[in-house]
Amino acid sequence: MKFDNPEDIIQLTPLWKGERFPNGRPKVPDNILERMRKITLEEAWAPLWMNGYKFQFEGDFKIVHPDKIMVGRAVTAVMVPLRPDLHETLLNYGHEQEGRRGFFNQWVIDQLVEDDVVVVDMFDKVFQGTYIGGNLGTAIATRTKRGGAVIWGGIRDLQQVVNIEGINVYYRGIDPTPIGDVTMVGMNVPTRIGKAICMPGDVVVGTPAGVIFVPPHLAEETVVRAEKSQVRDIFGFVRLREKVYTTAQIDSEWSFEMWEDFMRWFESDPAAAEYRHLNWDKELEQARARRDEGPSSSVRM
C-alpha cells in the first residue's frame, strides 16, 4: 500500500471534473470556499440530503472556538489501535520508501496547504489519542492560514491551542498524554467521523452545531441552493412583517404570483444586491407549470 496515493484518490472521486492537487485530491475553487463561509449548517445540509447524501453531518464534538466558522478542503487520515507487526511495517515503509519523517500524525500535517482541514478518524481514542497539541496546532495554522482540524479523538495543550489564531479544532476530548499505541493505515482515504463519512477533498464546514462534509462535485450546487434559500428567507421575513403573506404561504411552494413579487423585490431591494448573481429561470418555469395546480402543502427544505 501507499500513503496519499494519487491513483487511489482519483479513482475514489470520479465525479469531480475540476482542478486537482498534485496528489489527485479535488481542489474546489477558492471562491466556492469563500461563499461557503457565509451559509448555515442547515443550508449546507439540505442539498446533500436531497441528493441522497444522508451521512455527511456529525455534531458530537467539543470545539476550540465555537463562535467561529471553519471552511476548508479535507485531508483525511485513518488511525487504528497498535498491532506491532503492522505498526513497524507501515512506519518503516513511510520512512524508507516515501521519505517521511517523524510519527504518522506529522506525515499528514506536513502535507497541508492553504485552506486545508485535517480530518482524522482516531477511533474515539482520547487517552494517548491526542492527535495534535500546541506544536502541531501551530503547524496547522502556519500551513493552512484559516483551516483547522476535525479529530474523532483527543487533543492536548488546550491552553496553547486556544490561543492559536486563524484555525479551529473539533475534537472529542482532552488528555495530557502524548499520542501513542496507534498506527495510521490510510492517508487521503475514505474516513469515518462518528456517523459521517469524509472523502479527501470534501469541503469541511465547521459550525457551532457541528461539522458537515460536502462532496466536491456538489459544492457549487450546495452554495447556490444555500444562497437562494438565504435571499428567499430575507424576502419572506420582510413580507411576514408587512403581513402580506402567512407563514404557511412562505414555508410552502410559492405561487407564480409570489414569485413575481419576489423577483420585483429581488431586482430592486438593496438587501438582495449581493445575491444578484443567482439565476431563477428554473424556479420561475416550475412555478408557471404549477400555476393551475392550486395551493401546495409541500414544505421548503
Image (tube, rainbow, N blue to C red):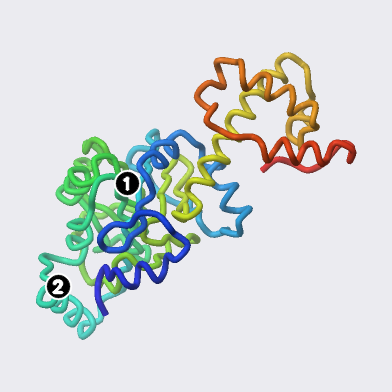
Nearer mark to the viewer, of 1 and 2: 2
Place of residue 169 in the rendered image (x, y in percent of width and height, measured from the top left): 32, 46
Q: Residues within 10 Å of mark 2 (few under 14, many from 20)?
A: few
Task: In this rendered view, identify the residue nearer to me: 203 or 159.
Answer: 203
Name the secondary structure under disc 1.
Answer: strand
Quadrant showing the N terminus: bottom left
Looking at the image, residue 205 sits to the left or right of residue 235; the answer is left
What residue is pinned by disc 1? 169
Inspect the image, locate mark 1, and give the three-letter code of the amino acid beneath it: Val
Q: In this view, does 258 lie above or below 167?
A: above
What residue is pinned by disc 2? 98
Q: In which quarter of the image is residue 253?
A: top right
Inspect the image, locate mark 2, and give the three-letter code of the amino acid beneath it: Glu
Name the secondary structure under disc 2.
Answer: loop
CA distance separating discs 1 and 2: 28 Å
Quadrant showing the C terminus: top right
Place of residue 91 in the rendered image (x, y in percent of width and height, measured from the top left): 16, 75
